[in-house]
Image (cartoon, grey):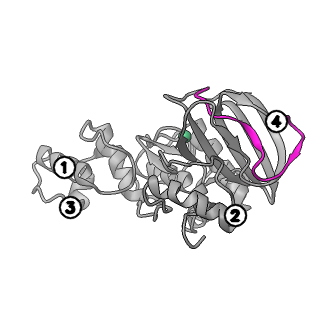
Amino acid sequence: MRARALLALPLILAAGAITPHATAADAGVAALQVGLHSHGLYEGPIDGITGPGTANAIRLLQKRAHLSVDGVVGPQTRRALGRFAKHRLGSRKLLVGNKGWDVASLQFQLAEHGFPSGSFDGIFGPRIDVALRRFQDWTGLKTDGVAGPATLGALTAPPPTIPLPLAWPLTAPVLGDRFGPRGNRWHSGIDLPADSGTPVYSARSGQVVWAGWRDGGWGFLVIVAHGRGERSMYAHLSRIDVRVGVWIGRGVRVGLVGASGDATGPHLHFEVRVRNASVDPLRALPLGEGH
Ligand SMILES: [Zn+2]
C-alpha cells in the first residue's frame, strides 16, 4: 500500500493540487443566473457563484430597468426579472408545467444531491419530474413528483457521500473537468484525460453489471456494482475487457480509454452512484500524501 501511494504521489502532484470542491454554490444565485440568461444578460456558467460575469449582468439589468446600479439583488432588481422571479422557492408546490426562479432553484438543488436534469432553464419538464421522483425515492418520501415542504426540507440536508474508499481507475491520473456545474448543466462525474488505449482499472471489487454500448452519450461503458448500492461507471471506452455477471477485484482492467459516445477527445469519464445518486468521486479517492 505504501509503495503504491508513493508511486502515485508525483503523478497526482503533477496534475496540481487535487482536492474535493467545497460547495460554495448557492441555488438562489443559480436561479438568478438562469433568469439573467433568459433576459440575454448573462452567458456564463450556471454555477451558483456570484463571479464578475454575474455581477456585471446584475448591473446591466439594473441599468436597463433604470434602478440604482449597485450590483446588489434586492426586491426591485428581482422584480426587474419579470414573471421569472415571481415565485421564491417554497412559496408554492412545484410540479410539471411550472416555470421560474423557484423551479431553477429546485433543479440546481436536485443536481447537487446527485439528480441532474439536463440544462438549467427553470422550466419544470419531464426530466425534472424524473429527477425529483428519484430523489424522493432516494430519501424515502412519497414519489409523487410534487416538490412541497417535505421535499424542499430534504434538499436542505448535505448531498450524499461515498461510503466506501476507491482506487484511481488510471495509474497516472490527470484531473480534467470536476464533478459539479459545467456550462449550463451539471457534470455528474470527473474527467480524466489520457491517451486512447490507456488501461482503465476497477476502482473497487464488485460485479460487472453493464459492459457494452450505452446511448445517451456514454459510448462504450462498464458499470461495476460494489454492494451497499454503490456503483462505479467507466465511460467513453475504446475497448471493453470484462463481461456482464463476472466478479472482479480492485485494480482489474475493465477496458481502454477512448472517445466513444459524446466525447470531444480521449478521456475517462468516471462516475460513482450511491443508490442512483451521483456523488463526487474525489471524496472517496486517495489524494496524495497522508492518504
Ligand atoms: Zn465527463
Q: Residues within 10 Å of mark 3 (few under 14, many from 20)?
A: few
Q: Earlier in the sequence, mark 4 or mark 1?
A: 1
User: Does residue 253 belong to the magenta stretch?
Assistant: yes
Residue 200 visible in the picture: yes
Q: How many marks?
A: 4
Which label's residue is closer to the chain start, 2 or 1?
1
Q: Which mark is residue 242?
A: 4
Between the C-alphas of marks 3 and 1, the distance is 11 Å
Foreground label between 4 and 1: 4
Amino acid of disc 2 = Pro
Q: What kind of element bears circle 4?
A: loop
Give residue 263's position: percent from left, percent from top: 53, 29
Res 93 visible? no
- Give the quadrant of residue 113: bottom right
Q: Are marks 4 and 1 in contact (CB under 8 Å)?
A: no
Please state the horizontal and vertical placement of residue 5, each as a whole percent of the image. 62, 63
For label 2, count other residues whose C-alpha is less than 10 Å away and answer few (under 14), some (14-19) or many (20+). Answer: few
Disc nearer the start of the sequence (3/1)? 1
- Residue 288: quadrant of the picture: bottom right
Instruction: Tell me the distance, in whole angstroms, between the alpha carbons under discs 2 and 3.
Output: 43 Å
Q: Nearer the viewer, residue 40 or 210?
A: 210
Give me the C-alpha separation between circle 4 and circle 1: 51 Å
Label whose residue precedes the other's in the sequence (2 or 4): 2
At 41% across and 60% down in the image, what residue appears? 26
**Of discs 2 and 1, which sits in the foreground?**
2
Residue 116 vertical placement versus 160 (above, below):
above
**Disc 2 to disc 1, C-alpha distance:** 42 Å
**What stretch of residues is rendered in magenta?**
242-260
